[in-house]
Amino acid sequence: MKIVSWGFLALILSCTPTQKTLSQKKAKPETYAETITQEELKEHLYTYASDEFEGRETGTPGQKKAIEYLKSHYESLGIPAAKSDGDYFQKVPLQKSSVPSGSMTINNTSFAVGEAVISFTPAEGKYNQIVYVGYGIDEGTYSDYEQVDVKDKMVLIKAGEPMNEDGTYALSGTSEPSVWSNMSEAIGKKGELAFDKGAKGVLYYDSGNYPRYSNYYSFIKNSSNPRMTLQAEANTALLMVLDAEPAKLIFPDIDSNHTPKLLDTDVQLALENQGFVDSENVVAMIRGSEKPDEYVVISSHLDHIGVSKDGQINNGADDDGSGSVALLEIAEAFKKAKNRGYGPKRSIIFLHVTGEEKGLLGSKYYTDYEPIKPLEQTVANLNIDMIGRTDPKREGNRNYIYLIGSDKLSTELHNLSEEINEKYMQIELDYKYNDDNDPNRFYYRSDHYNFAKNNIPIIFYFNGTHEDYHKPGDTPDKINYDLLENRTRLVFHTAWEVANRENRVIVDKPVE
């Protein structure tokens, strides 16, 4: 055996990696969970749910302040945007369910919308022929469409149904009217039939019920909190309601003549939509170290319901200011881990969605129209909506959280959630609202649902409703910051495990 000098041996040993490098060591998530504190959550929320943000209603200046606040925080942490162009904002094209402005001109006589003509959809165009289809009915052996072609034409339909000379209804042969005479159902039924036959638009004459349609038009026009929809899903089928004067300008004999025919007339529509809404999701991402093309999405909604008619601000501290600031703290904890060489194996997307209060619109746009990252590579969604208070109807331990949906798609995710809670937090997990027969249907009422319907496993974290739900009393001073800290840490620990485990969670109960 060759003898080696002690000095040379020492040199060799000094160059041998006897200890793991920092990145090779197993990180302790509790170290980073502890960076999520009551104090920082409170500081964020007293700003985010302040009067300055005016209730964060979708599309308002208050909502713009909210998205700038979120963006600034991610920039300060050095967490980049999820979009490849570096923009933290994902534009979500929305449209109010409002009525258009403008006019309808018939043979040089103009009617402002809302006077003798009503429209609920915008339209522009000139027509020199209108197809009159009488009652616009096609049922059994009776058809108003048999002798006319309505494809790509504007049609004129009148309310009611044909009558016999003895006063009975032609379709039934009795004195009882059918659904074709029902105000609420007939207009939709006749309109749908005309569109199915290829009509471009419907002019619906109903002078008897015109005042009721007019009242509904005024209600929508003057609503301070209109409904919204995604522009891609907005109803663009033109259906206008006419009073007697404009209808008789198109066809003077409309009351007495029921025979379908082609009418030579000049009709011009200039109906402009006033309801487009400019709104945004905010999306940031920490790129995964080993599986960067697999994604864990943590979400909350950034919006609330704005200012009441009496001028009171609905601050939305719990709904969903609590989820919004929790997401900021979770992001900060993951970033601190990454800065020390313990970045998540999978990419983490921090998704703040708009329009939740308008019908889960921001999350629906993300999942159904413009996923920033592929849904098939999205491993799970952890959604946070109201985790800062307690449910007054609930008895027992205040250190609880309602979990909804954890077992709907993935038994493995549910079991993982239970194990992580037992290991790190010992919060009481309450599944009261996870029941399929829950009359509140909370599973369908927050943004996780748009992921779940796409077979992405989800967990919805929720504290339940309270007396200040959707009221001005939902303010930062009523938040239980110790509970908010605990619940936020639970979401962080669960996300850490989902992001760092070897295999993605299995979907064993997919939606068909």
Image: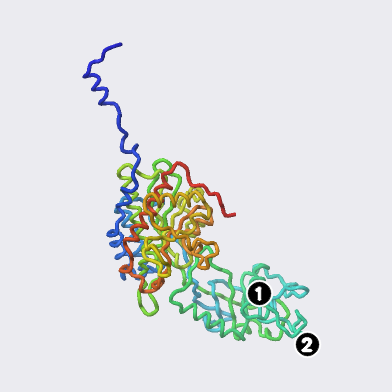
* Quarter placement of the N terminus: top left
Asked whether disc 1 touches disc 2, contact meaning CB atoms under 8 Å apart, the reply is: no
Side (left or right) of 504 relative to 125: left
| Residue depicted at x 53% and y 68% | 439
Q: Position of residue 21 (x, y in %)?
A: 31, 35
Q: Position of residue 70 (x, y in %)?
A: 34, 59
Q: Name the disc covering residue 205, or none.
A: none
Q: Position of residue 451 (x, y in %)?
A: 50, 56
| Residue depicted at x 69% and y 76% | 136
Could you tell me the amino acid type at mark 1?
Answer: Lys
Of the pair 22 and 489, the residue shown nearer to us: 489
Q: Which residue is mark 1?
A: 190
Give the residue at the far top of this rendering.
1
Q: Which residue is mark 2?
A: 165
Residue 450 visible from this viewpoint? yes
In this rendering, the answer to whether 451 lies above or below 231 is above
Q: Secondary structure at mark 2?
A: loop
In this rendering, the answer to whether 234 lies above or below 263 is above
Q: Secondary structure at mark 1?
A: helix
Side (left or right) of 34 relative to 436: left
